[in-house]
Amino acid sequence: MYIENLEDKKERERQRERENFYRQNNLPQDGETLEVPDDFLISAHSGDTLAHWRAPEFEAFERDRKWYLVVTLALAAIVGYAVFTNSPVMAITFILIGVLGYIQIHKDPRVLDFMITPDGIMAGREMYDFKNLESFWIFYEPEGVKAISLNTRGQLIPYIHIPLGAEDPVRIREILLDFLPEEEKEPGLIETADRLLRL
């Protein structure tokens, strides 16, 4: 009984120390979650923020019944061909692509915070340091795309696209020119297909 109480007392003391540590460092307590981006990241960089804006993480397109009909028929044709050629793996793969695609296109985009600091660009919970970036380009169409394209040094993900939302692209360009060279980039095949197919 006495040993049990001593253990309980030590556990309560450890819990208090843990709570104090979280509180002092602006970290979430057990069971709490932070908004995107982490409040901790925003507070850590808020003193030296050069630009800060909010925008949806991706562009949501309007799709009519005709679009759904065409996509469904295309997937059905591919699955039918897979069944006809006795390729069950292909059939299952395209059925899964259809299901996951349906879930993805009905997902509402989260509104994220974006910040430019002297160290890099923060997008949601991700920080892209300028030392890991090679160049940038801003895609801008008055009634269309408004995004920063960052050329990274990475092999797997060579480009990162950051939406500008309602932010002034000229102002963002002027800020980025202090840290990165501007390198013109044409929209790639994936970006063009995304816009044409409304994905």
Image (spheres, rainbow, N blue to C red):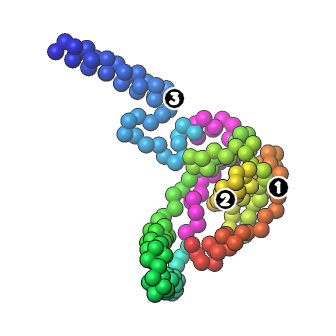
Estimate the spatial distance between the alpha carbons at disc 3 and disc 1, rounded to whole Å. Answer: 37 Å
Q: Which residue is mark 1?
A: 182
- Residue at 53% across, 42% down: 38
Q: Which mark lies nearer to you, 2 or 3?
A: 2
Indicate left or right for 9 with 129 as reference. Answer: left
Looking at the image, can residue 69 be seen?
no
Q: Along the line of sight, which residue is nearer the eye, 180 or 177?
A: 180
Q: Quadrant of the C terminus?
A: bottom right
Q: Amino acid at mark 2?
A: His
Is 49 contained in the magenta span?
A: yes
**Element under label 1?**
loop
> Which disc number belongs to residue 25?
3
Is 86 contained in the magenta span?
A: no
**Element under label 3?**
loop
Picture coordinates of residue 77 (x, y %)?
49, 86
Estimate the spatial distance between the alpha carbons at disc 2 and disc 1, rounded to whole Å. Answer: 15 Å
- Residue at 41% across, 34% down: 29
Q: Along the line of sight, which residue is nearer the eye, 155 or 124?
A: 155
Q: Which residue is mark 2?
A: 161
**In the image, which residues are magenta?**
42-60
Q: Along the line of sight, which residue is nearer the eye, 169 or 107?
A: 107
- Residue at 64% across, 75% down: 193
Q: Amino acid at mark 1?
A: Glu
N-terminal of the pair, mark 2 or mark 3, is 3
